[in-house]
Image (cartoon, rainbow, N blue to C red):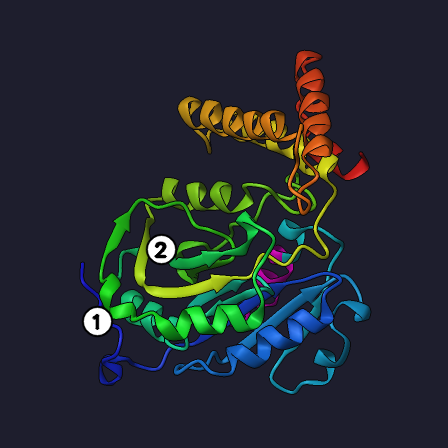
Amino acid sequence: MSIRPFDTAAIDPARVCVGIATRGRPDQLAAMLDNLARQTLKPQTIIVCCTGPEDVGAVAARGDVTVVYEQPGLARQRNGILRALPDGTDWIVFFDDDFYPDPRWIETVSRAFRAEPGLACITGHVLADGILGPGLTREEALACIAAHDPATDDWVIEGYSPYGCNMAFRCETIAGLRFDERLVLYGWLEDRDFGTRVEQRGGRLIKLGTATGVHLGVKGGRVSGRKLGYSQVMNPVYMHRKSTMTTAQLIRQIIRNVAANLVKSARPEPYVDRRGRLVGNLIAALDLLRLRLTPERAASL
């Protein structure tokens, strides 16, 4: 499949909703929404799901944004967005509050959905991901996007698990589905779990090279190292039990994360609580040895 990103004449109007789950970062949210206004194909609805008015600040007064409230947790907040979807929405786009899409991201994804009726989920191509380092600034993100020509990435990867910072779903393919709220707090692999259940329904998942953007990886508002470390071990085992992760994926996921935490704990990065994550890994391992399959315990650590 080849999707040409700039032929706007071929696009029929689509009812697109952008959903953003956020907590504790009102300034970052406002900056992201200002950037979202640059999209060549505007969403008909923007739904922000937060835990209280302090999460959104002045954004609550914007006429182009619907604010809904939920208990804390990425899965819960995304489910709040799904419940608030207007009737007749064609596709829902989930962006993180620190993801900056190329101005043609929604246009490009909409064209792909129109061209390929069997498509259920599209994940974009992240040009730079600040989550892998100390994080990126808004200026760095915009410069990276401006310097890149999406036409050079005219490729598609089939069967690609969605990446939560920038993913879109055809609404009719996810009717009745919800993110698993036992995957608490930051969610850790909730996007893969949801995508696998869409695929199990017969939905087609792809990564689209021409839908580009930058993930700032802002550190503020994220969960503690101990909580995340617990989820790094417990969540894959839980997903394996419910058949949304294979045995090979389970082994790779746990070994990669535990090994990274163990090796880097001696000289941890200043922006990662490696020792806290390692402690969380160990607590989860002990729970599993006691035959406790409790992903929700991360919230109480």
Residue 142 percent coordinates (x, y):
48, 73
- The residues bearing labels 1 and 2 have C-alpha atoms spaced at a distance of 19 Å
Earlier-in-chain disc, 1 versus 2: 1
For the point 76% across and 54% down, which residue is it?
71
Q: Is residue 41 above or below residue 196?
A: below
State which region is magenta: 78-87
Residue at far left of view: 1
Say if residue 188 shows up in the picture. Answer: yes
The label nearer to you, 1 versus 2, is 1
Q: Amino acid at mark 2?
A: Ala
* Image quadrant in which you'd find residue 34: bottom right
Q: How many marks?
A: 2
Task: Label 2: state its secondary structure.
Answer: strand
Dominant SS type (magenta): helix
For the point 62% across and 25% down, which residue is it?
262
Q: Which residue is mark 2?
A: 120
Q: In the rendered structure, does residue 258 fall within the stretch colored magenta? A: no
Q: Amino acid at mark 1?
A: Arg
* Image quadrant in which you'd find residue 13: bottom left
Q: Which residue is mark 1?
A: 4
Binning the other alpha carbons within 10 Å of mark 2 as few (below 14), some (14 to 19) or many (20 upward) gives many
* Relative depth, front residue between 136 and 171: 136
